Amino acid sequence: QVQVVESGGGSVQAGGSLRLSCASSGLIYYSGRCMGWFRQAPGKEREGVAQIYSGVSSTYYTESVKGRFTISQDNAKNTVYLQMSSLKPEDTAVYYCATRTGICGGRWDGFDYWGQGTQVTVSS
């Protein structure tokens, strides 16, 4: 049974930092998978935030978080991290971790396993 579990959300003031973690288990082939972070704010569609390919750690970010967020991974722990710095109120959302097979390539479709989400709230 595949499980994807996020943790690390919380409330922070604008300009602050948070680190999200995403632990996955039950995946037969962890290497060669794209791991992605998504977010959904109230009343808005879900959007892709950052992604990393487990094979060679290549990364991709949506424009609004470039220079502020960093995605990384620890393949030994099957865990992906999202370090978020210089947070803004518009970063407030539920953040989800998801995975799919193959390279990332900046694509946000085709993710087949999702976590339950973790709330991030940034106050001004």
Image (cartoon, helix red, strand yellow):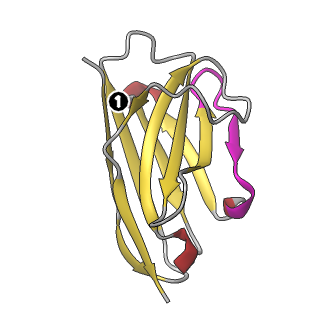
- Looking at this rendering, what residue extends furthest in the bottom direction? 124
The picture quadrant where one finds residue 69 is: bottom right
Give amino acid for label 1.
Ser
The region drawn magenta spans 53-64
On screen, residue 5 versus residue 84, left or right, reads left
> Against 15, is 73 above or below?
above
Residue 51 place in picture, x, y as percent: 61, 39
Q: Eyeballing the image, is 124 above or below 67? A: below
User: How many neighbours does mark 1 have within 10 angstroms: few (below 14), some (14-19), or many (20 or more)?
Assistant: many
Secondary structure type for disc 1:
strand
- Residue corresponding to mark 1: 24
Residue 56 is a magenta residue:
yes
Q: Quadrant of residue 85?
A: bottom right
Spot occupied by residue 80 in the image (x, y as percentages of width and height): 46, 39
The residue drawn where x is 70% and y is 42% is 60
Q: Residue at x 39, y 28 (%)?
A: 78
- The location of residue 99, given as percent across then percent down, is 48, 29
Image quadrant containing the N terminus: top left
